[in-house]
């Protein structure tokens, strides 16, 4: 889902993939630490495949409850590119995007659930 991201005055200090809980933990040098579920990261992929070239071309990501991250590659000094267990690997998550996803988790997750419901879909496992 399309997000507007502002630049941040923080840099990551640690990134840990927790394979049992299916969460990516990222700590920043301003003291913030976020644990982001793999499903959440997958449904908020910044890839053109999901976002299209305009808001009308966005594809709602459904059925991602059991998706995990199987690999993470650094992208320059500005982000990461995770490979998800469903094969998706074209999204580049900037530090600013990851920070926003962490800081606004509650609101963004609820927004996703509402869009899912409005489109007639539901999740099959709990978050």
Image (spheres, rainbow, N blue to C red):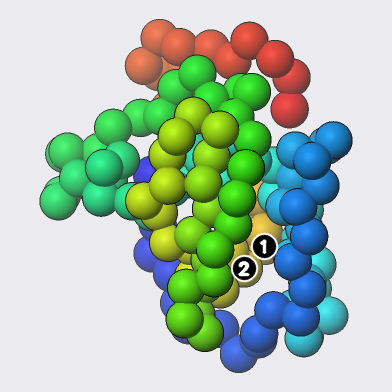
Residue at x 60% of width, y 90% of height: 9
The numbered mark at residue 94 is: none
- Please identify the residue farthest to the bottom as the structure is shown: 9
Residue 78 vs 99, above or below: the answer is below
Q: Is residue 50 left or right of residue 34?
A: left
Q: Secondary structure at mark 1?
A: helix
Residue at x 53% of width, y 40% of height: 84
- Label 1 crowding class (10 Å Cα cut-off): few <14, some 14-19, many 20+? some
| Image x and y of residue 75, in percent | 47, 73
Residue 123 vs 43, above or below: the answer is above
| Image x and y of residue 98, in percent | 58, 64
Q: Which of label 1 and label 2 is nearer to you?
A: 2
Question: Which residue is the site of mark 2?
Answer: 99
Q: Secondary structure at mark 2?
A: helix
Q: Is residue 64 left or right of residue 10?
A: left
Residue at x 79% of width, y 41% of height: 19
Residue 120 occupies quadrant:
top left
Question: Which residue is the site of mark 1?
Answer: 103
Q: CA distance from mark 1 to mark 2?
A: 6 Å
Q: Is residue 11 visible?
A: yes
Q: Which sits in the foreground, 38 or 57?
A: 38
| Image x and y of residue 111, in percent | 51, 37
Q: Which sits in the foreground, 83 or 6?
A: 83
Residue at x 76% of width, y 52% of height: 17
Q: Are marks 1 and 2 in contact (CB under 8 Å)?
A: yes
Q: Which sits in the foreground, 56 or 86?
A: 86
Residue 68 occupies quadrant:
top right
Q: Which sits in the foreground, 38 or 86?
A: 86
């Amino acid at each position: 889902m399309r997000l507007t991201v502002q630049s941040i005055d923080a840099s990551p200090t640690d990134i840990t993939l927790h394979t049992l809980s299916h969460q990516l933990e990222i700590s920043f040098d301003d003291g913030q630490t976020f644990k982001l579920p793999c499903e959440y990261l997958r449904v908020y992929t910044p890839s053109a495949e999901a976002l299209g070239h305009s808001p009308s071309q966005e594809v709602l990501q459904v059925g991602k409850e059991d998706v995990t991250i199987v690999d993470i590659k650094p992208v320059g000094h500005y982000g990461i590119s995770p490979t998800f267990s469903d094969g998706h690997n074209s999204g580049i998550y900037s530090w600013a995007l990851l920070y926003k996803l962490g800081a606004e988790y509650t609101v963004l997750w609820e927004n996703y659930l509402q869009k899912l419901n409005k489109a007639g879909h539901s999740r099959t496992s709990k978050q």
